[in-house]
Image (cartoon, rainbow, N blue to C red):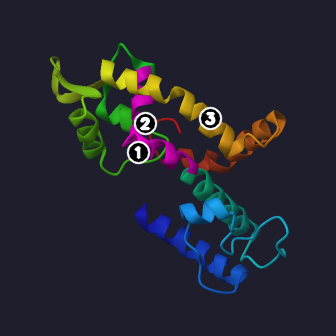
Amino acid sequence: MHAKVSVQRAAALRGVRSVGGGRAARGSRGGAASGDAGGVPGADAPRGKCDSPEQEAYLHMWRTYDLLKALEEQVFDRHDLSAQQYNALRILADAAPDALPTLALAGRLVSRAPDITRLLDRLERRHLIRRDRRADNRRVVAVSITRAGTALLDELADEIVACGHRQLGHMKPSDLRLLVDLLRAARAPHERERPGDA
């Protein structure tokens, strides 16, 4: 899978160079703040310079993700949290009072966690989760959210809503629904390659 991702990114970078005419600009908070597209084709860019329509669409999704991710990182950095850790806490909160097996939790994360154990180690050190081995099967580790974890989610709630408005509040609800449908269609064939929901 890593090789596949590397090929995709290499192809994307070739597309960025062909459109921008120079070195590919990596995403950064500075780029997000200035609105500089870094060579990625924008609404007014000449068409037909990417290798394919699929590559052009992928470049736009990649650039959009980079810009929107920078906004949410500003929120999570204030709480010494990563987006993936927050996602794990939300999943555990939804499952409460039940606990989830580690692999079930990993399968429900929005993005893959190459090292789910390390992610949970960090949350446990902050007393935001707890892990217990099931009495009926000692090989299965069940993960649950703690009161401290729930309190952190409550503290973050308003900031997360405000972040969503900053990210996509400029779009009409009907356009957002259309965007969601298109993104689901784009990833549908690939969802079968990973366990759990996206």
Identify which residue is drawn at 69% across, 71% down.
40
Whether 160 is drawn above or below 55: the answer is: above
At a point 21% along the width and 29% down the height, the residue shown is 140
Where is residue 91 drawn, in percent x and y?
A: 44, 28
Q: Which residue is mark 3?
A: 162
Element carrying mark 2:
helix
Q: Decide if residue 128 is in sight here.
A: yes
Mark 3 or 2, closer to the camera: 3
Q: Measuring 15% from the left and 17% from the top, which residue is drawn there? A: 135
Q: Decide which of tag 3 and tag 2 comes sooner along the chain.
A: 2
Q: Which residues are magenta?
A: 71-93
Q: Do residues under tags 3 and 1 come within 8 Å of each other at their CB atoms?
A: no
Q: Please tell me which residue is depicted at 37% across the width and 33% down the height of the picture.
A: 105
Q: Which mark is residue 82?
A: 1
Is 118 covered by the magenta stretch? Answer: no
Answer yes or no: do the residues labelled 2 and 1 have beta carbons within 8 Å? yes
Say what secondary structure mark 3 lies in.
helix
- The quarter of the displayed image where residue 42 is located: bottom right
Toward the top, the furthest residue is: 97
